[in-house]
Amino acid sequence: MTDLAGSFHTFYNNNRILDEENLELTAFRLNLCRATRQVLKNALDLLGISAPETM
């Protein structure tokens, strides 16, 4: 789980999520963000750890 969080952090810092010039890339990156959020939420739920919706 920490590997995923670290990899996502690196991705998020190095890539613009919203790209007005490339809507297909924007859609892909938004879906990647949503999927990562869900995987981390599921892992935390399995461990019995609550996570805030926003930071």
Image (cartoon, helix red, strand yellow):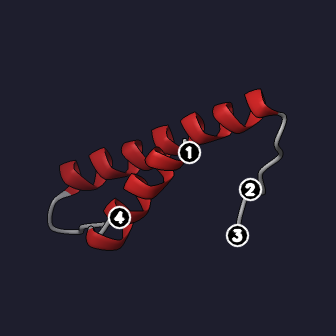
Q: Which mark is residue 10?
A: 4
Q: Name the residue carrying label 3.
A: 55
Sequence-wise first label, 1 or 2 = 1
Label 3 amino acid? Met
Residue at 45% from the left image edge and 45% from the top image edge: 4
The image position of residue 37, as x and y in percent, is: 56, 45
Rounded to the nearest whole Å, what is the CA distance between mark 4 and mark 3? 18 Å
Q: Residue furthest front?
A: 2
Sequence-wise first label, 2 or 4 = 4
Other residues around mark 3 within 10 Å, as few (<14) / some (14–19) / many (≥20): few
Q: Name the residue carrying label 1.
A: 37
Label 4 amino acid? Thr
| Label 4 with label 3: CB-CB less than 8 Å | no
Quarter of the image for the C terminus: give it.
bottom right
| Label 2 with label 4: CB-CB less than 8 Å | no
Residue 8 as seen in the image, left or right of residue 5: left
Q: Which mark is residue 53?
A: 2
Secondary structure beneath dot 3 equals: loop
Label 2 amino acid? Glu
Q: Between residues 24 and 15, which one lies in front from this camera angle? A: 15
Rounded to the nearest whole Å, what is the CA distance between mark 2 and mark 4? 21 Å
Sequence-wise first label, 1 or 3 = 1
Q: Residue furthest left?
A: 21
| Label 1 with label 2: CB-CB less than 8 Å | no
Other residues around mark 2 within 10 Å, as few (<14) / some (14–19) / many (≥20): few
Secondary structure beneath dot 2 equals: loop
